[in-house]
Image (tube, grey):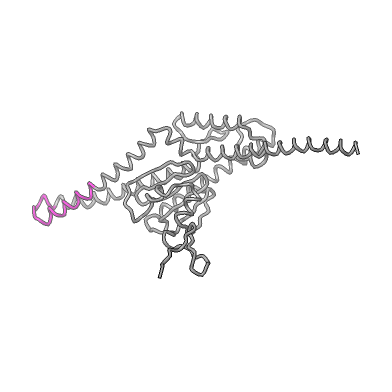
Amino acid sequence: MELTSPEVEGDRVRTPAGGFRKKTTGVKPWLNLDCTGQAHVFDAGKHAIMRRTGLPARDLRILDPLLSYPSTVLGRERAIVINLEHIKAIITAENILLLNSRDPAVSPFVEELQRRILHHHHITESQRVEEGRVINAGGTGSVNLHDLEERHPSAVSSRSFRSFREKAEESKGGGDNALGNRNGLKFLPFEFNALEACLEAACTWLDNEASTLEQEAYPLLDKLTLKISTLNLERVRQIKSRLVAISGRVQKVRDEIEHLLDDDEDMAEMYLTAKLLQQNLENSSATSIDEQDVGGDDKIIRPDIEDRHAIS
């Protein structure tokens, strides 16, 4: 009897009866936190996440909890991949996906991240309302391009985007990858706000482990000073092994942060908000050009039809 392998399509497997069933292998729960602070958990497989974020399979592999990968931060075209200690996440310009959100060690980070996102959303909305009042009053000031896109998509030109990007570059040149409002207040784009929260959570996690180890080490060293024994020596040896392991993890996180700060191209690659804005502008420009072409064709066809009616 010949055995045939089931046909696989994405995250589904074709059954012998001709239907489809969902693949159970590789399907994991993900927590989705959007830019407004709303959270929900959904189940998705590797292929679904790849389609959603544009990431290759090798980038998702470093988030696999069954595999031991060192701390890594990767900047890609549409997403940032975070693997820092217990934080395993994918950041886009509009949301953040957390892989192990049900882990008790991750719960405090989720609460802090949601608080930051809500605060960031409140600031951006306040700025949009303020700039909307300036526009309605006919005043001058900085204009939020997201509002212009929603109200008048054709009014956002490539020149206005270049002006926006130049201001962002000036902010980066001043040491802040931040956007500013008309009052001069600075705030990070969504992706950098989420990245900052991930880095702080990883550093806090390592700091707590080091503090715990320090509290255990000093009493053992005091005992070893008073009495040298095999038991005390073994306990000190274990403390030393843990200290070496923590030092290596700390150094890896430090290397990742220094690498990001030293490489301007990597930092620019992570500016997902600017990429998304540019893509929206290009799509809007392409749509307006197509509409103009269609309108021009109508103007050419209509006189021809009228001439035919006049001749007949």
Say above or below: 151 vs 102: above
Q: Main secondary structure of the magenta part?
A: helix
Q: Residue furthest front?
A: 1
- Front in this rendered view, residue 80 or 23: 23
Which of the 4 image quadrants contains residue 108? bottom left
Q: Is residue 13 magenta?
A: no
Q: Quadrant of the N terminus?
A: bottom left
Which of the 4 image quadrants contains residue 291? top right
Q: Residue 179: horizontal and vertical position, in percent?
A: 52, 36
Q: Residue 311: horizontal and vertical position, in percent?
A: 90, 36
- Front in this rendered view, residue 283 or 31: 283
Q: Quadrant of the C terminus?
A: top right
Q: Residue 224: horizontal and vertical position, in percent?
A: 12, 51
Q: Is residue 225 magenta?
A: yes
Give the residues drawn in magenta, as a range.
Answer: 223-244
Q: Is residue 104 left or right of residue 304?
A: left
Which of the 4 image quadrants contains residue 155? top right
For the point 45% across and 49% down, which residue is it?
113
Say above or below: 51 vs 282: below
- Front in this rendered view, residue 50 or 276: 50
Q: Is residue 294 left or right of residue 284?
A: right
**What count of labels does the image hold?**
0
For the point 39% across and 37% down, which residue is it?
260
Q: Residue 34: horizontal and vertical position, in percent?
A: 52, 50
